Every structure is written in structure tokens, then in C-alpha cells.
């Protein structure tokens, strides 16, 4: 018997499909097309082929922005995974007020990023900021958090007579301040995700380990870490993608990616080229390059799935 074709299921998905097409797929296709044009904000331009891509490869600010973004990802992603797993384990072992602690940890994630960025900018203020006040109690001199262009590794090793300059000098202290804020902002979400993963692990494994005399540390590495690997896999992919797209912190906490472009991230650079200098074609070329990088990393990370214990 032939199945009857019905239009009603398609009507249910049409609103979501329309929004996906209008605000996702069509802009991506248009951005790809515009990247081959010398395009103005008015929507007119001439075809220049691969000229925008050639200019991008020779653009020092583009490479600086990409280098800054890579440092952000290299530090934020591992720190987010390690800290969120640590806090999730601690929360999972708390008996009283567990709901209260979950709420406290999750609140930064649901708080407006604009409000959070402004508060952290005040905290990092050189004269009146809370951060300098706190480190002053342990004998550290006030730092120029959001205006220091030197790399953190360069600053740490300069006292030992080791000179590290350029990219190997690490992210600037200004970018490191943004890294601290970014890790803190996403910590609550990742912690709750890990907590859900931990609660899906059967207690039978831990009871058997206790009988065999395994220590808590051994239980963590032999039971918890392998069985929570699906959650780690998810957190790794999502945190990497979100971190590459960091924008608001730079826009609100620093002066146009300063000092000396050391906090200028790739998404901010796309915004600057597209809406400050109105080079829409060039901005689209950089956006496509970012899309390819994120796609390649995601595909590579998918290869790690063979190490996941479902």
C-alpha cells in the first residue's frame, strides 16, 4: 500500500527551516560570493577574483589576529575542560545545598556578556581594579592588565635573562586578562554538562574499586576519566568552536584590539574590516578562511571519537 504524502509535517518545520535559510545558509553563500568582489557597503562592486585572498595572505594584521586567536584557543580550551571537570567532581561529591552550588556556578554563563565584560574591565583597572588590590596583598606590584602589550612568557622569563619575543613570547598580558574572563564565563556551562555526565556513571564501578582497595585518585583516572570521555569529546568540540568566535570581550574590554593589536582576535578583525573600513569583500574572505579553519579542526577532532567510551 502506498504511503500518502502529507503536507502538514513540512508546515511544522517550515518556520525553523525558513529562519535557518534566511539567517544562516543564504548569508554564508552570499559571503562566499562577495569574497570575490571589491564590495562596498552599498552592495555594489567589481569582480576581482582571488585578490582578496592574496591580500589576506600578505596582511600582517590578519596573521597577528590569527596568532592571537590561536593563543586564546590553546589556553582557554584545556583550561575550560580541566577546571570544569574538577568543579563537577567536587559538586558531585557535595551532599548538602547541591542545587544552590549548581545555580551559583551556572549564573555567569546566563549573565549578559556585555555586563560581564564591563565588570571585568573595571576589575582589571590599573588604579582602582579589584584584581590589582588582591594581588597587592601577596606582594605583587600593580599590573597594566589591559594596556600591557608584552607577552606573559616574555615577562616571566625576562627576569631569568631569557628573551622571548614575538609569538613565542606568549599572549600579551592584555589578552591573558581576556583569557581569564573567557574561561570564567564558560565554566558554569561546562561544569553542568560534566556533572550530568558524572551522574550517568554507575556507582557499581566505584564500589568494586573500593573493595579492591583502589585509591580515589586511581578511581578518577581508571573509572571517571574514561567513562566521562563522551562529555569531554562534546566539550572539546563546542568550546573550540565558541572560542574561535570570541568577539564581545575584545570589543568591550580593549581599545580596538589594542594595545598594539595584541588583543585583536580574528572575529574582531572581520568586524573591523567589514563595518569600520567597509571592506566587505575582504572581510568575507577572512570569514571564509575562519570557517575553513574551524571546519578542519572539527573534522580532525572527530577522529578522536575512537578514544571515546560510550
Image (spheres, rainbow, N blue to C red):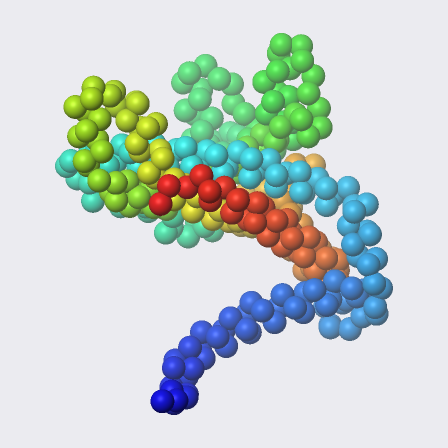
Residue 305 in view of the camera: yes
Taking the view exactly as shown, the residue that stands out farthest to the front is: 1
Q: Residue at x 73, y 66 (%)?
A: 34
Q: Residue at x 15, y 35 (%)?
A: 95
In the rendered image, residue 115, in percent from the top left (x then y), is placed at 43, 49
> Nearest the camera: 87 or 250?
87
In the rendered image, residue 212, in percent from the top left (x then y), is placed at 20, 22
Residue 116 in view of the camera: no
Q: Residue at x 44, y 43 (%)?
A: 233
Say above or below: 160 vs 182.
above
> Nearest the camera: 11 or 152?
11
Q: Residue at x 72, y 45 (%)?
A: 62
Q: Is residue 231 left or right of residue 93?
A: right
Where residue 5 sits, quadrant-wise, is bottom left
Q: Is residue 46 left or right of residue 106?
A: right
Where residue 25 sits, quadrant-wise, is bottom right
Quadrant of image for the N terminus = bottom left
Amino acid at each position: 500500500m502506498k504511503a500518502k504524502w502529507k503536507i502538514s509535517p513540512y508546515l511544522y518545520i517550515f518556520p525553523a527551516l525558513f529562519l535557518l535559510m534566511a539567517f544562516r545558509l543564504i548569508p554564508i553563500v552570499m559571503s562566499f560570493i562577495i569574497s570575490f568582489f571589491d564590495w562596498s557597503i552599498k552592495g555594489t562592486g567589481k569582480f576581482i577574483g582571488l585578490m582578496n585572498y592574496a591580500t589576506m595572505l600578505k596582511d600582517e594584521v590578519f596573521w597577528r589576529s590569527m596568532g592571537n586567536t590561536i593563543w586564546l584557543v590553546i589556553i582557554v580550551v584545556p583550561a575550560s575542560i580541566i577546571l570544569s571537570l574538577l568543579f563537577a567532581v567536587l559538586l558531585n561529591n557535595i551532599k548538602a545545598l547541591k542545587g544552590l552550588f549548581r545555580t551559583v556556578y551556572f549564573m555567569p554563563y546566563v549573565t549578559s556578556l556585555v555586563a560581564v565584560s564591563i565588570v571585568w574591565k573595571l576589575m582589571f583597572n590599573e588604579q582602582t581594579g579589584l584584581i590589582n588590590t588582591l594581588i597587592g596583598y601577596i606582594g605583587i606590584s600593580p599590573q597594566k592588565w589591559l594596556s600591557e602589550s608584552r607577552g606573559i612568557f616574555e615577562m616571566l622569563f625576562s627576569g631569568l635573562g631569557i628573551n622571548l619575543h614575538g609569538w613565542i613570547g606568549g599572549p600579551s598580558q592584555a589578552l591573558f586578562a581576556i583569557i581569564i574572563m573567557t574561561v570564567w564565563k564558560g565554566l558554569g556551562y561546562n561544569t553542568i554538562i560534566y556533572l550530568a555526565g558524572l551522574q550517568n556513571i554507575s556507582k557499581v564501578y566505584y564500589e568494586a574499586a573500593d573493595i579492591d582497595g583502589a585509591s580515589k585518585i586511581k578511581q578518577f583516572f581508571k573509572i571517571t576519566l574514561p567513562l566521562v570521555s563522551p562529555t569531554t569529546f562534546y566539550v572539546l568540540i563546542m568550546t573550540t568552536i565558541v572560542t574561535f568566535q570570541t568577539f564581545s570581550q575584545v570589543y568591550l574590554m580593549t581599545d580596538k584590539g589594542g594595545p598594539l593589536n595584541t588583543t585583536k582576535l580574528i572575529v574582531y578583525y572581520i568586524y573591523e574590516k567589514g563595518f569600520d573600513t567597509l571592506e566587505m569583500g575582504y572581510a568575507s574572505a577572512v570569514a571564509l578562511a575562519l570557517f575553513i579553519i574551524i571546519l578542519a579542526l572539527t573534522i580532525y577532532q572527530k577522529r578522536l571519537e575512537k578514544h571515546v567510551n560510550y
